[in-house]
Image (spheres, rainbow, N blue to C red):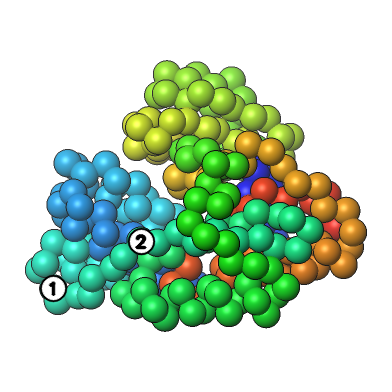
Amino acid sequence: MSGHSKWATIKRHKGAIDAKRGKIFSVISKELTIAAKNGGGDPNFNPSLRMVIAKAKQNNMPSDNVEKAIKKGTGELEGVSYEELVYEGYAPGGVGVIVEVTTDNKNRSASEVRSTFTKCNGNLAGAGALAFNFQRKGQFIISADKTDEDTLMEVAIEAGAEDIKNNDDHFEVLCEMEAYNDLGAALQEKGIETESAEIAYIPNNLVPVTDPDVVKQVLKLTETLDELDDVKAVWSNYDIADELLG
């Protein structure tokens, strides 16, 4: 989603955050396990793990859960083997949708994602069908009440940010993937709390959606996908006015 759409989605999800706590913990647990498996269990020497631990703390994930997920990644505890997969498709109105999945059962995930697209009037596409319309970037969404623009610019630019957008009630900071960990660490060091921090799919162009019925269908598809247990994140290139988001 664009920064604008991402922020709108964050605000819409705030009211239901407790109901989704289990899903959030599940996603973070998988990220912790994968990060520990790829780079070791010591966050001092594993920047990716350090970033996920910060996300876990921000979401009030119990420390025991964090430690268990890390130990599964390092092999100290028995765990499952996760695959990271990407699915691409179209929502009503020609809106592009990219779905990131972390799963221990590829067939199950594929079936659930495909079924959701079909039930919500979308179409699952082949690999690479939409990827050229998006760029992989580090993306940080920061509420305007967490910092001021001058402070953020000073910290972010020095740490490798390539773009900082002031959207009145929030900031969107973008960077190349290689600068993601350094930028995240710099924000943490300065105590600048993020609403969202991830390697995102940033659309090159947005698709305006103005028909209220189509808006409902697009949101139903993206939100239903987001609720699937194996789905880590859903990215889209829709452009919907706030008043239509409800």
Furthest residue toward left: 76
Quadrant housing residue 121: bottom right
Report whether 10 appears left or right of 151: right
Q: Nearer the viewer, residue 91 or 42?
A: 91
Name the residue rendered at 20%, 52% in the picture.
38
Name the residue rendered at 63%, 36% in the picture.
204
**Disc 2 target residue:** 84
Q: Is residue 27 above or below residue 237?
A: below
Dot 1, crowdedness within 10 Å: few (<14), some or many (≥20)?
Answer: few
Report whether 39 appears left or right of 196: left
Q: Secondary structure at mark 1?
A: loop
**Disc 1 target residue:** 77
Distance from Cα at disc 2 to Cα at disc 1: 21 Å
> What quarter of the picture does the C terminus occupy?
bottom right
Q: Is residue 157 visible?
A: yes
Query: Please, what is the three-letter code of the amino acid marked with disc 2?
Result: Glu
Report whether 40 appears left or right of 245: left
Q: Secondary structure at mark 2?
A: strand
